[in-house]
């Protein structure tokens, strides 16, 4: 199995980013790259709770990821399973992988270490890296520059 790790710094308070990870509006705002945005999302932010995020391509193609929350420690860590209910990376059909977000305060905001583990192969990891990189770019555009705001 293959994994990928991305490390990003966002100029936002950890609590703002954690909320963007654990609310339906937050997930819908930034998950998915620009060419595969989240159309809608649901999440029950507790251990054992489920999430669902529906992505739609610009040409109308549908993809949906689902999973279960395995660990939640606000505002520091979130771990979930990940599987494609339909669409998504063909190599992952019928497989369950895991995503983890570790947040650490830094002077300019928050450092996020993201790991997607248990992927089928290097091609799948590259496809998911493209998607998650685009998503983190959106997270930075939408929630960045928050570090100086009052809570």
Image: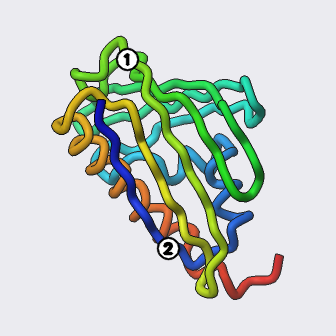
Please tell me whether residue 31 is drawn above or below residue 117 in the rendered image: below
* Residue drawn at the location 51% of the way across and 24% of the way down: 66
Where does the image place residue 60, in percent across and percent down from the top left?
28, 31
* Residue drawn at the location 50% of the way across and 59% of the way down: 113
Where does the image place residue 52, in percent across and percent down from the top left?
56, 27
* Residue drawn at the location 69% of the way across and 37% of the way down: 71
Where does the image place residue 129, in percent across and percent down from the top left?
29, 49
Please tell me whether residue 92 is drawn above or below residue 34 in the rendered image: above
Q: Residues within 10 Å of mark 1 (few under 14, many from 20)?
A: few
Q: Is residue 60 left or right of 108 when viewed as pictured?
A: left
SS under mark 1: loop
Q: Residue furthest left?
A: 123
Ranked by sequence position, the earlier of labels 1 and 2 is 2
Q: Is residue 77 left or right of 93 when viewed as pictured?
A: right
Relative depth, front residue between 54 and 96: 96
Name the disc covering residue 143, or none.
none
Q: Is residue 66 left or right of 73 when viewed as pictured?
A: left
Q: Residue furthest front?
A: 1
SS under mark 2: strand
* Quadrant of image for the N terminus: top left
Question: CA–CA distance between discs 1 and 2?
Answer: 30 Å
Name the disc covering residue 9, or none.
2
Q: Residues within 10 Å of mark 2 (few under 14, many from 20)?
A: some
Task: Identify the residue under disc 1.
Answer: 95
* Quadrant of image for the C terminus: bottom right
Contact, CB < 8 Å: mark 1 with mark 2? Answer: no
* Residue drawn at the location 26% of the way across and 40% of the way down: 125
């Amino acid at each position: 199995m293959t994994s990928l790790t991305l490390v990003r710094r966002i100029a936002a308070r950890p609590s703002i980013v954690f909320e963007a990870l654990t609310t339906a509006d937050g997930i819908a705002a930034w998950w998915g790259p620009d060419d595969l945005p989240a159309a809608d999302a649901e999440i029950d932010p507790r251990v054992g709770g489920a999430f669902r995020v529906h992505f739609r391509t610009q040409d109308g193609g549908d993809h949906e990821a689902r999973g279960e929350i395995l660990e939640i420690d606000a505002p520091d860590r979130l771990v979930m399973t990940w599987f494609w209910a339909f669409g998504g990376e063909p190599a992952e059909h019928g497989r369950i992988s895991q995503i983890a977000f570790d947040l650490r305060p830094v002077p300019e905001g928050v450092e996020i270490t993201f790991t997607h583990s248990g992927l089928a192969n290097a091609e799948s990891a590259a496809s998911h890296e493209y998607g998650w990189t685009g998503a983190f770019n959106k997270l930075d555009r939408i929630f960045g520059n928050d570090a100086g705001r009052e809570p």
